[in-house]
Image (cartoon, helix red, strand yellow):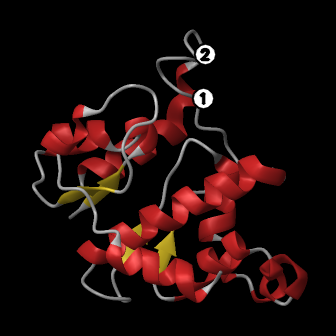
Amino acid sequence: WRGSDRDFAIDVATRALHCAKQLSKGIEEPLYFFSDSNDLVRYMAEELRDPQFLSNTTIFQNKYDERARRIVSSMNVVARDVKHANPHIDKNKGLHPFLYYSTFVDLYLAINARCVTFGIGNYALLGTKISGTSCKNVYELEKWGHTKINKRAPFCSNETYLHLLDEVA
């Protein structure tokens, strides 16, 4: 959880939160953040809200960390307990059913969410299909060949996100 892969993941998550914020009713409304990366969930939903972690000023010399800190501080970001892995149902076959618990918690909450933002990996897309919600948007196009996502949900506006990037360059 270091280097350019970490920076990329944080940048994508920051964009996702920015898009989710466009659908939010305000800071009082909890925004459930989930990803197939527990490190990313821990960072975005726990560490960026932890005063002791935030007192480490050296981490925020990185523009990706500073952007993430700014967006998270303007929202009520929550997440499930990330002590337990959330294996991919399609990639991690044959595990004992209880090991998929975290994955199904994410799916259940996506199904019952007022609004859903999804993108790379389409992790939340199944929840929107089951629920039939019309309150959804896409933060980034799928990177692995699925480009028809715009027909599923409106693409999030880049304008204010680009402003956030300019502020923390």
Residue for point 29% across, 33% down: 147
Left or right of residue 145, residue 114 in this image: left
**Toward which corner of the image does residue 47 lie, by quadrant?**
bottom right
Identify residue for label 2: 95
Identify residue for label 1: 99
* Residue 92, horizontal then vertical, whole percent: 58, 17
Please name the amino acid that badge 2 sits on: Leu
**Toward which corner of the image does residue 42 lie, by quadrant?**
bottom right
Helix, strand or loop under label 2: loop
Residue for point 47% across, 17% down: 90
Along the line of sight, which residue is nearer the eye, 147 or 79? Answer: 147
Helix, strand or loop under label 1: helix
Residue for point 48% across, 22% down: 89
Along the line of sight, which residue is nearer the eye, 9 or 49? Answer: 9
* Residue 1, horizontal then vertical, whole percent: 81, 50
* Residue 81, horizontal then vertical, whole percent: 62, 56
Please name the amino acid that badge 1 sits on: Leu
Along the line of sight, which residue is nearer the eye, 73 or 110? Answer: 73
Left or right of residue 146, residue 93 in this image: right
Residue farthest toward the top in the current orientation of the protein? 94
Q: Which mark is residue 46?
A: none
Residue for point 36% across, 44% down: 141
